[in-house]
Amino acid sequence: MEKIILDSEIRKQLTKGEMKKIRNSGKTPAVLYGEKENLNLLVDTSKFNSLLSKAGHNVIISLNFPDKTSKTVLVKEIQKNVISRKISHIDFYQISMEKKIEVAVPIFLIGEAPGVKAGGVLAHIVRELKVKCLPTDIPEKITINIANLEIGHSISVKDLTIPQNVEVLHQPDQIVVNIVSPTILEEIVPGATAETAAEPEVISKGKKEEEGEEGAEGKPGEAKKEAAAPAKKEAAVSAKKEEKK
């Protein structure tokens, strides 16, 4: 992978207002995380955007400084404005061309899957492949041809074509992309309805149980009345016998 040159200039700490003016002038604030120190920088926004569109996120950059020195860096993170989606800040980190580094390589799908034509749903599970290699061996992208992918079939990490000297950091059986049968909404809704309907049913049972308990408390009272009636009759009979005597 070739190096791309990008000029930069050292900047001081800026306020939010100063940051806004800098961005409006066509420059983007950046930070370089170095081996010994971190540097606050400014880079040309247009040139950086051109660099990304030409070489991608993992491009090796020779970052030049006003004192004619340079450092070899990679892009660590790009922050964008939530509304405009314009780049608002860049993080670079210094690398050694002789040391392996870990990077995320984008995965691109090509071809038309027959499983999708048959009504299946394409699930692109892993969109970036984490790899470890020397900076010069970083792949620009990993391409997967899905032209033979049927419903129920998948492509795993072990099925990918990986360049030499590149170590993949995923498990070999990790599924990258597959074709699944479409989910039928009608199969899910009745289950949810049954669960929803179950709650009123439980509540109604609870009410019946409460009513039953109240009824149970009432029944002993009725039993006492029924038990008291024979006792009154026996008392009346005894009283009549006494009068006859």
Image (tube, helix red, strand yellow):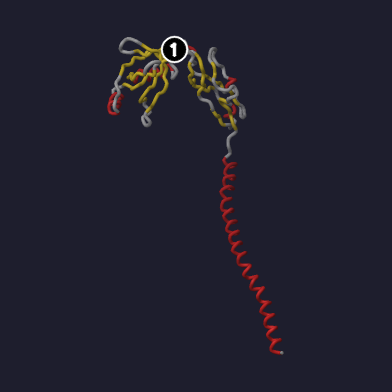
Count how many numbered circles sit on residues in the image: 1
The residue indicated by pointer 1 is 96
144 and 171: which is toward the camera: 171
Across and down, in percent, residue 50 comes to 38, 18
Quadrant showing the C terminus: bottom right
67 left or right of 35 in image: left
Relative placement, left or right, of 51 versus 25 is right
Of residues 142 and 15, the one nearer the viewer is: 15
Position of 58 with respect to 182 (left or right) is left
User: Residue 212 sits in which quadrant?
Assistant: bottom right
Quadrant of res 28: top left
Instruction: Give percent across and percent down for residue 241.
Output: 71, 86
Q: Crowding at label 1, few (<14), some or many (≥20) Cα neighbours within 10 Å?
A: few
Residue occupying image coordinates x 28% and y 26%: 18
Instruction: Tell me the SS state at disc 1.
Output: loop
User: Residue at horizontal 65%, vertical 75%?
Assistant: 228
Q: Identify which amino acid the numbered label 1 is placed on.
A: Ser
Q: In front: 161, or 238?
A: 238
Expressed as whole percent of the image width and height from the top left, the position of residue 33 reads 39, 19
Image coordinates for residue 130, horizontal then vertical, percent: 51, 21
Residue at 42%, 17% (x, y): give it.
74
Q: Is residue 213 above or below residue 79?
A: below
* Rendered image quadrant of residue 37: top left
Residue 129 falls left or right of residue 22: right
User: Quick one: which residue is furthest to the bottom in this view?
Assistant: 244
